[in-house]
Image (tube, rainbow, N blue to C red):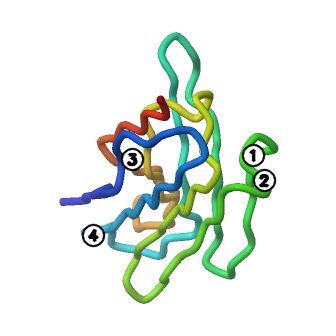
Amino acid sequence: QVQLVETGGGLVQPGGSLRLSCAASGIIGSINAMGWYRQAPGKQRELVATITSGGNTNIADSAKGRFTISRDNAKNTVSLQMNNLKPSDTAVYYCHAAATTGWGRQNYWGQGTQVTVSS
């Protein structure tokens, strides 16, 4: 059974920091990219940051300079350090893993973790 378990969401004041972590298990194959997406109320899900197994990153313009993504390939974990948070960062954050398996390329999602930035 594939699981992506996210931890680290919560309520923080503007300018504060949070660290999200995600651990993937049960994936039979190689995980190519891991990352984070978010969805705010009434909006579409959008990319926040991704990282490949080789360490190449892609970070949304809205997150550049504030968010850092890292990954531990041996443990199949990915983390998102979020600094200088803004109210516009409020959303449900989803962990994502893109893998190559015996069934071809598969996309896996976590259940989501709420991040609320408010004073």
Q: Position of residue 111 (x, y in %)?
A: 29, 42
Q: Are marks 3 and 4 in contact (CB under 8 Å)?
A: no
Q: Earlier in the sequence, mark 2 or mark 3?
A: 2
- Label 4, secondary structure: give it: strand
Where does label 1 land, which residue? 60
Which element type, helix, strand or loop, lies under badge 2? loop
Looking at the image, which residue sits at the far top? 42
Instruction: Indicate whether 42 appears above or below 105.
Output: above
Q: Which mark is residue 25?
A: 4
Query: Which comes before the other along the chain, label 4 or label 1?
Result: 4
- Label 3 SS: strand
Dots 3, 1 in contact, CB < 8 A: no
* Amino acid type at mark 1: Ala
The three-letter code of the residue at mark 3 reads Trp
Separation of marks 3 and 4 at Cα, in angstroms:
12 Å
Relative to 42, residue 85 above or below: below
* Residue position for label 3: 109
- Between 12 and 32, the residue placed more toward the observer is 12
